[in-house]
Amino acid sequence: MKANPKMKADPKADAAAAAPAAGGKGKLFMLIGAAVLVLGLGGGAGWYFMHGSGDAEASEPAKKDHGSSKKKKKEEHPPEYLPIEPFTVNLQPENGDQYLRVAFTLQVDGAEQAELIKANMAKVRSRVLLLLSGKKASEINTVEGKQQLAGEILAVVKTPFDEHGDEQEVSDVLFTEFIIQ
């Protein structure tokens, strides 16, 4: 058959015929682009959170300059973990005789603080022993009671060893053994 000279080639039909072939490649490029974008955002978020996003400073705007010097000290010294020998104490009587066996580890701000606490371990143990022996089993057998006890231990350990000395830089009490009988 002879082509009708009045019928011209339809550019829309040619584009529609070529679109399925090009559409597959376009979708592939869009999927790859989306995957790269998601991975890039994930990597950026991970870097942001791993490298100190500064949110600790933003959440504590009321602190003055004296607080920032402590932050710098903490950044200079990685935390040290100082295990404390277990304690076994009689608890205050409620339902007969009960005792507590507890061991914990102190998280201190650097090796210098760990050495200071080791050098004054007799004072640390005495303070903690007096604190523990004044407790009742019902006060410390719940999660909240254990958390409160950890805070109290932290407070007595932080108390300066010398009358006009500085507080020890202890940031956490981590229980490693806790038995009430």
Image: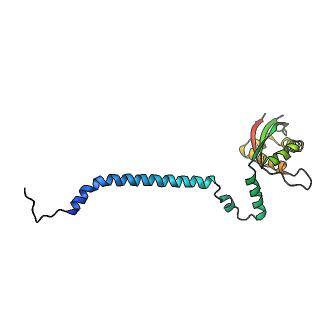
Q: Which residue lies furthest to the left in this view?
A: 1
Judged left or right of residue 68, residue 29 is left
Residue in the foreground of this view, choosing between 99 and 156: 156
Q: In this view, does 104 lie above or below 43?
A: above
- In the visual, does 41 lie left or right of 84? left
Q: Residue at x 65, y 55 (%)?
A: 52
Q: Where is residue 175 in the image (x, y as percent from the top left)?
A: 75, 41
The picture places residue 75, in percent across and down from the top left corner, at 73, 54
The quadrant in which residue 54 appears is: bottom right
Q: Quadrant of the N terminus?
A: bottom left
Say above or below: 126 vs 160. Answer: above
Q: Which residue lies most toward the right here?
A: 163
Number of numbered discs:
0
Q: In which quarter of the image is the C terminus?
A: top right
One can see residue 117 in this view: yes
| Residue positioned 82% across, 37% down in the render | 85
* In this rendering, position of residue 47 left or right of residue 143: left
Q: Where is residue 59 in the image (x, y as percent from the top left)?
A: 68, 61
Q: Where is residue 37 in the image (x, y as percent from the top left)?
A: 48, 55
Q: Which colour scheme is used?
A: rainbow
Asked whether residue 145 is in view, the answer is no
At x 70%, y 64%, the residue is 61
Q: For this rendering, which residue is in front, 69 or 175?
A: 69
